[in-house]
Image (cartoon, rainbow, N blue to C red):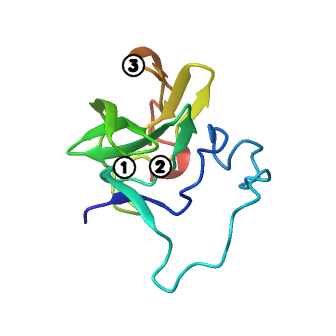
Amino acid sequence: MKPLLAIFLLALPVPADWSQWRGPKGNGNFDHETTWSHQWPAVGPKVLWTAKVHIGYSGIAVSEKRAYTLGNLEGDDLVQCLNATTGKLVWSKNYPQDLIPKYNPGGPNAPPVIEGKWLYTFSKQGLVSSWDKATGDLRWTCLLYTSPSPRDRG
């Protein structure tokens, strides 16, 4: 399996930031978008770019023309910053995290969240991290999950 992130459609100006799950208002909508159409050609919307983001189910956060996401490659979670216009990699940081393919192929599930100049990530194992969104420099980490939950103890 070779997961790819595909950014479709909209050869339109870059809209407002999408810095959290479900968008600017948390409702899954770009309410201000007036030129959106649900009428796509039979072949589908135009693909603007693709990027290899590896294994996982993380969403995407967009801020200041950069797209941020997570994936897992060979036992490391990868935090990736991509140019939202071209899909080119701006920076990538990694840290050890097991894949954990229990209910799915594994990898990160939570999307990154942006607040101001900080990017926040949450790993499947409970590692919360804060990053400088411009450079990818790690600010701090906090491990929330340190023992199995009662239902996993058998």
The first of marks 2 and 3 along the sequence is 2
Looking at the rendered image, the quarter that the C terminus falls into is: bottom left
Asked whether the residues under the numbered discs 1 and 2 touch, taking CB atoms below 8 Å apart as contact, a structural biologist would say: yes
Q: State the SS at label 1.
A: loop
Residue situated furthest left in the rendering = 74
Indicate the position of residue 90 as horizontal and vertical percent values.
34, 31
Q: Residue at x 32, y 60 (%)?
A: 3
Q: Amino acid at mark 3?
A: Thr
Q: CA distance from mark 2 to mark 3?
A: 20 Å
Q: Which residue is mark 1?
A: 107
Asked whether the residues under the numbered discs 2 and 3 touch, taking CB atoms below 8 Å apart as contact, a structural biologist would say: no
Q: Nearer the viewer, residue 3 or 32?
A: 32
Q: Amino acid at mark 1?
A: Gly
Indicate the position of residue 104 as horizontal and vertical percent values.
39, 63
Q: Which residue is mark 3?
A: 135
Q: Which residue is mark 2?
A: 58
Q: Nearer the viewer, residue 50 or 52?
A: 50
Task: Judge from the rendering whether residue 25 lies leftward or rightward of residue 60; answer left or right.
Answer: right
Q: CA distance from mark 3 to mark 1?
A: 23 Å
